[in-house]
Structures are given as structure tokens and as C-alpha cells.
Image (cartoon, rainbow, N blue to C red):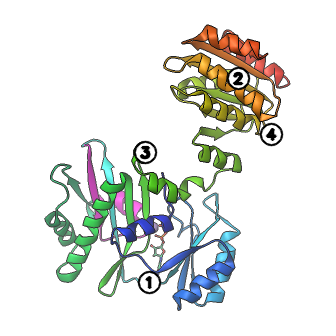
């Protein structure tokens, strides 16, 4: 799960990492109010889940609240790197003397977290990494020992810091590590970590949380995840809300499968017979009838979809439960669309019987089902 900058900064603040004063805004008026509250010069930053916003014109400076409103209006009417801007972050403008880089990511080869740090932070960090890799310091963290204060001070020293600044930098590195471990971050990054007088401030923030660990972060899931929603259509947003594994495509045949591989194969087969899939929707394994009902209802309500093709291979998934889910959705949705079902595996006979009794077409193979759905959708 990707957090937007303002969300990541809220998490940073909770872990004691210094961030600039500021607030998110969804309109020019709101941006003006935030700028007035902050007072003085501000930066207005497009909240889109991609890096390189600075270079793409997504970061603007403003001298007055009025100018902040204009800048916000401009950003909110634009796209940054192909993503429509729905929110901006209005922050106090920092007098940055130097830009550092500090990041934490997982090194799959060693199976550990690794801290990355550089005194050459800022918008060109990728270039620094490829041209002068020696300017990026890497510190692997032993997961048993953890990341200790002396490790952190060693990083700060190698970046050329001493005294109070060394202590502040190592403190921030420790907190970033604690944060990363606590929220199961895949990556978390401060770029730039801005030197402002004797202070270090996280001028930018990135935080991606491991999706496979989200089950233990219900609180974060409730509050955040703005970065996931940006760039999605309304239908995709709704699918996210329902927790469906769904991707919108531009055709008119709705597709439901179980398992990503089978669902992809179903898309391919429909395409082979000259049809156009309208989506990818993977039910996963062991799906209860309610979940199937939800998925079928979702596609029945999608106006772009003319025919539904459901392709299930029952292993831990039981075909009779799938059939019940499909029939319930048909009864309740109040929308009639042709459906073609292919069920194979555990409790297949029972599943097919339930569907046929309800008047739903069942085909024996994926090819037959795909071909039939293409004909029902109006042919090639
Ligand atoms: P990114 O381009 O998406 O990584 O967005 P950043 O938030 O990192 O901003 C890009 C650049 O804008 C930074 O590296 C800074 O040089 C500059 N910038 C961002 N905030 C401020 C600020 O408050 N004051 C100043 N002077 N520059 C800023
Ligand atoms: Mn940045």
C-alpha cells in the first residue's frame, strides 16, 4: 500500500521524525486558509503517488496566501506524470541549506532491511546512485541485533556530520528504522532530508507498506492508502472498497476467475475468440458464497459489461458455493445480463445442478465458455 506524502508525514510525525508544518487541501479556498494559518511563504505540493514531482512541475512556491490559492488551483486542474491531482499539501517553506537522503528498504538477497543514506539528496538521487554509487552509504541491519545507536552514528559520521547534527541525524535514522519495522514498510524514504540551520527536517516522505502484512495494520488501512486510489477510475475505487482484486479493461465481457493464472488465461481465450474483456477479477481461493455474490453483483452493476463469464477451477474452492453465490447475485441484483459459467472440480455436479435449475448456462470447457460469451456479447 502506497501512502501519499501527507499521509506518510503524519506517520513520520507519530514516530518523532520532524516534518514541516502544513496541511492537505482539496480546493484553492482551503489552500488559502492553510497558507494563512502557516503565515509567510509556503510550498504547494501535488499529492500523487509518484516520485519526481518537482521536475514534473508538481511543486510550486508561493509568497502570499492569495498566490498559494492560485498555485493550488493550477495544480488541482492538472495532471502530474499522468495522474490527476485531487489534493495538494500546503506547507511552510523551508530555507534549505543542504539536501540529504535517508531511506530504508528490504534487501531480498540478504533478507534484511538496509539503510541507505547520502549527503547528495534531492531530485537527482537516481543519477547520484548510477554515476557515483560510492556516494550512497549502505548499512545492512541484522534483524536479530536490530539497528543500534552506534550504527546510526556511524552513518552520520560517514556523511560528514559531527556534534549535535550527527546526533540529530542518527536519531532520525533510528526512528525511521523503528517506523519501518513497526508498519512493515517495503520502503520508506526521506528525500530530501533538509538541513535548515541546526535542524534536520523531512521535506518529503515516502512510505510503502507490504500488502501481505496489512492484515495486522487495520488502523493504517482505515486511515491511509490515498496513494492507492489516485489514478483509479470510479469503478476501480469501488472494487478497492469491496476488497476485490480487480483491474478495469476496455471491453464489454465481464470476467471472473479464481487464481490470477486462470483469470489471465480466461482473458486470453476470450481475446482469441475475438471478444474484448472488460475487466480482470480474481476471486482467489476458498471463496465463500457471499464473496462470489459481491463480485458478480459488482459486474452486473457495471454498465459497460454486457455478458458475464465465470471460470472456476474448484480445489479448495467449492463449485456449489460458487454456484450459490452466482444465483443469489442474479436474484438480488435486479439487473439481467447473460451469463456463461464454466465450473470444474470439487462439488462440480452439485454446482452445475444449482446453476441449471436457476436457468444459467453452464459450459464444459473454458474454450466453449469463452466462445459462447463472445457470441452473446455480439460476436467478434
Ligand atoms: P519530489 O520531486 O516528488 O521528490 O518532491 P519533493 O518533495 O522532494 O520536492 C522536490 C524538491 O523541491 C526538493 O528536493 C527541494 O529542492 C524542493 N523543495 C521542496 N520543499 C521545499 C521547501 O520547503 N523549500 C525549498 N526551498 N525547497 C523545497
Ligand atoms: Mn522527493
Q: Residue at x 59, y 71 (%)?
A: 88
- Residue linked to disc 3: 215
Q: Which mark is residue 179?
A: none
Residues in magenta, as a range: 111-133
Q: Secondary structure at mark 1?
A: loop
Does residue 165 appear left or right of residue 227 in this picture? left
From the top left corner, tell me how far across and down residue 25 is, in percent: 61, 74
Horizontal arrangement in the rendering, residue 296 relative to residue 164 (left or right): right
Secondary structure under the numbered disc 3 in the rendered image: helix
Which mark identifies residue 303?
A: 4
Q: Which residue is mark 1?
A: 94
Q: On residue 270, which mark appears?
A: 2
In the depicted structure, whether residue 282 falls above or below residue 109: above
Circle 3 Cα neighbour tier, 10 Å, few/some/many (<14 / 14–19 / ≥20): few
Q: Residue at x 42, y 86 (%)?
A: 95
Q: Is residue 124 visible?
A: no
Tell me whether the residue at label 4 lies in contact with that at label 3, contact meaning CB atoms closer than 8 angstroms: no
Tell me which label, 2 or 1, sits earlier in the chain.
Answer: 1
Amino acid at each position: 500500500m502506497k501512502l501519499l506524502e501527507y499521509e506518510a508525514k503524519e506517520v513520520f510525525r507519530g514516530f518523532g521524525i520532524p516534518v514541516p508544518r502544513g496541511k492537505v487541501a482539496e480546493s484553492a479556498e482551503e489552500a488559502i486558509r492553510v497558507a494563512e494559518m502557516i503565515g509567510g511563504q509556503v510550498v504547494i505540493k501535488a499529492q500523487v503517488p509518484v516520485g519526481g514531482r518537482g521536475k514534473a512541475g508538481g511543486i510550486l512556491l508561493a509568497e502570499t496566501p492569495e498566490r498559494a490559492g492560485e498555485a493550488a488551483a493550477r495544480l488541482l486542474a492538472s495532471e502530474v506524470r499522468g495522474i490527476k491531482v485531487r489534493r495538494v499539501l500546503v506547507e511552510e517553506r523551508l530555507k534549505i541549506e543542504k539536501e540529504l537522503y535517508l531511506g530504508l528498504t528490504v534487501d531480498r538477497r540478504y533478507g534484511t532491511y538496509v539503510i541507505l543514506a547520502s549527503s547528495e539528496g534531492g531530485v537527482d538521487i537516481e543519477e547520484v546512485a548510477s554515476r557515483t554509487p560510492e556516494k550512497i552509504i549502505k548499512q545492512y541491519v541484522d534483524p536479530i541485533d536490530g539497528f543500534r545507536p552506534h550504527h546510526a552514528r556511524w552513518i552520520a559520521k560517514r556523511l560528514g556530520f559531527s556534534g549535535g547534527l550527527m546526533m540529530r541525524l542518527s536519531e532520525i535514522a533510528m526512528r525511521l528504522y523503528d517506523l519501518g519495522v513497526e508498519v512493515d514498510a517495503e520502503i520508506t524514504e526521506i528525500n530530501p532530508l533538509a538541513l535548515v540551520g541546526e535542524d534536520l527536517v523531512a521535506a518529503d516522505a515516502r512510505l510503502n507498506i507490504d500488502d501481505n502484512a496489512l492484515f495486522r495494520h487495520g488502523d493504517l488501512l482505515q486511515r491511509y492508502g490515498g496513494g492507492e486510489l489516485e489514478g483509479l477510475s470510479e469503478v476501480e475505487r469501488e472494487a478497492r472498497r469491496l476488497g476485490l482484486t480487480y483491474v478495469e479493461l476496455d471491453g464489454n465481457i465481464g470476467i471472473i476467475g479464481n487464481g490470477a493464472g486462470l483469470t489471465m488465461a480466461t482473458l486470453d481465450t476470450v481475446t482469441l475468440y475475438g471478444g474484448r474483456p472488460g475487466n480482470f477479477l480474481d476471486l482467489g481461493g476458498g471463496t465463500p458464497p457471499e464473496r462470489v455474490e459481491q463480485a458478480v453483483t459488482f459486474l452486473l452493476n457495471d454498465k459497460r459489461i454486457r455478458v458475464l463469464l465465470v471460470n472456476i477451477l474448484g480445489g479448495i474452492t467449492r463449485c456449489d458455493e460458487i454456484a450459490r453465490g452466482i444465483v443469489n447475485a442474479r436474484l438480488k441484483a435486479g439487473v439481467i445480463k447473460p451469463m456463461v459459467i464454466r465450473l470444474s472440480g470439487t462439488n462440480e455436479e452439485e454446482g452445475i445442478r444449482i446453476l441449471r435449475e436457476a436457468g444459467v448456462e453452464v459450459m464444459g470447457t473454458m474454450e466453449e465458455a469463452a466462445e459462447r460469451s463472445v457470441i452473446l456479447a455480439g460476436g467478434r
